[in-house]
Amino acid sequence: MPGLPALCLRPRDLRRGAVLTLAFLAAVGTAASTGCWDREAPAAAFAARAQGPVPEPPRVTGTADREAVARAAAEAVADGKSGKKAAQEVVSRSGDRWGTVYDQGEYAAFAEGLDGRWTGVGLWARRGPEGRIEVDKVQPAGPAARAGVRPGDRLLSVDGQAVTGLAVTGVVALLRGEAGTPVVLNLSREGADLTETVRREQLRTEPVTVRQLRDGITVIKVASFTRGSGERVKAAVRAAPPGGGLVLDLRGNPGGLVAEAVTAASAFLDGGLVATYDVRGEQRALYADPGGDTTRPLVALVDGGTMSAAELVTGALQDRGRAVAVGSRTFGKGSVQMPTELPDGSVAELTVGTYRTPGGRGLDGSGITPDVAAGTGAEERAVQVLGGLGVGP
């Protein structure tokens, strides 16, 4: 549930001035990741902050042709068929790994997620082997949790419609609806079938939480880069005890608004390059705001669930020598999508470019290798690293 997909140059707010989006489209309640530009902070605002050389972008491969997609949709609509379905077939054949097509409702729903709110049952879905749909996470105290739904449960149908083989975004669309309306979930757990009826609710997530550890260490957990999260990170850094170390926990962070990611990176940098990106070969750059904390020791905690905009932040802090990255290799989503509005109102989001870290690393498909590998004891390892950087007695 949180937030539906929206990554790319949005279709002019579906009509007004384009706003760029990075990362791949996260779907409401999926384990996918988004990285997008906030409509209120267009890319040009970042580029104007500073000047400097921009590394040559890597060549983009596996992209769908916009004209071919739009033409297929138009022909289908003229024949009384689904433009979305025809467009998706073209995208699927193109080899565009991150390209996809959304109907109007799916695409509009992402706006809610950018504010950290959405309507649903409080579960995140993932696609497992052989097209199975599994429950990835359950929001504590949400409708699904109260009904006893658990991570690892297999979702068989929603309101009687089988979901095996569906794209996660399609499953998400079935789970969404008006607050207060019921939805019937047919599940399988350890070979036993279960049926639960839950009511959709307006749900929210807290994107930034703060904890204090021993020796004045502050842990700033960023669950996603929804609107306002960047300033919350800045506030958490300012409020941290003087002389202590900082842990920026980006584990499981699926990305979000690129504008917020840049603001968050600015909390630890005094200006300078955060990332470069290209759109159909045109090179652009993102810069941090000046005045961030550049003195306190910093560890960035990452894992395989660190995606998109969260990787952008990690790569910037690592390349700039500002943080030691601890954990496991990140997901590896570093491409840019742009949407094309189709004749039936659906939206095709197609890959048009990639982004790179300040050191020129392309992350798409490779991710970020942490400086210090750590698994289940990653936070404890982070504390040890901070100790080696002079934090503590």
Image (cartoon, grey):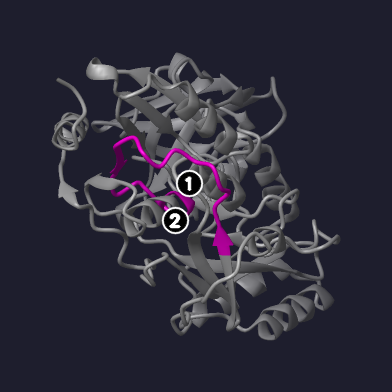
Question: Is residue 64 positioned above or below 216 on the image?
Answer: below
Looking at the picture, tell me which residue is in the foreground, 189 or 336: 336
Q: Secondary structure at mark 1?
A: helix
Q: Secondary structure at mark 2?
A: helix
- Residue 319 seen anywhere in this rendered image of the structure: yes
Residue 37 is situated, as x and y percent measured from the top left of the image, at 64, 54
Question: Is residue 335 positioned above or below 204 on the image?
Answer: below
Which residue: 58% across, 39% down? 226
226 magenta-colored: no
Residue designated by label 2: 312
Measured in 3D between alpha carbons, the distance from the residue under mark 1 to the one under mark 2, in whole angstroms, is: 9 Å
309 magenta-colored: yes
Q: Which residues are magenta?
A: 286-311
- Residue 2 seen anywhere in this rendered image of the structure: no
Q: Give whichever of discs 1 and 2 has the lower sequence position.
A: 1
> Residue 116's mark?
none
Mark 1 near mark 2, Cβ–Cβ under 8 Å?
yes
Residue 146 is situated, as x and y percent measured from the top left of the image, at 46, 14
Residue 50 is situated, as x and y percent measured from the top left of the image, at 61, 63
Which image quarter holds the C terminus? top left
Query: Relative to residue 129, is residue 102 drawn left or right?
Result: right
Which residue: 56% across, 75% down? 278
Residue designated by label 1: 265
Which image quarter holds the N terminus? top right
Which residue: 62% across, 84% down? 65
Q: Amino acid at mark 1?
A: Ala
Q: Amino acid at mark 2?
A: Leu
Residue 170 is situated, as x and y percent measured from the top left of the image, at 57, 50
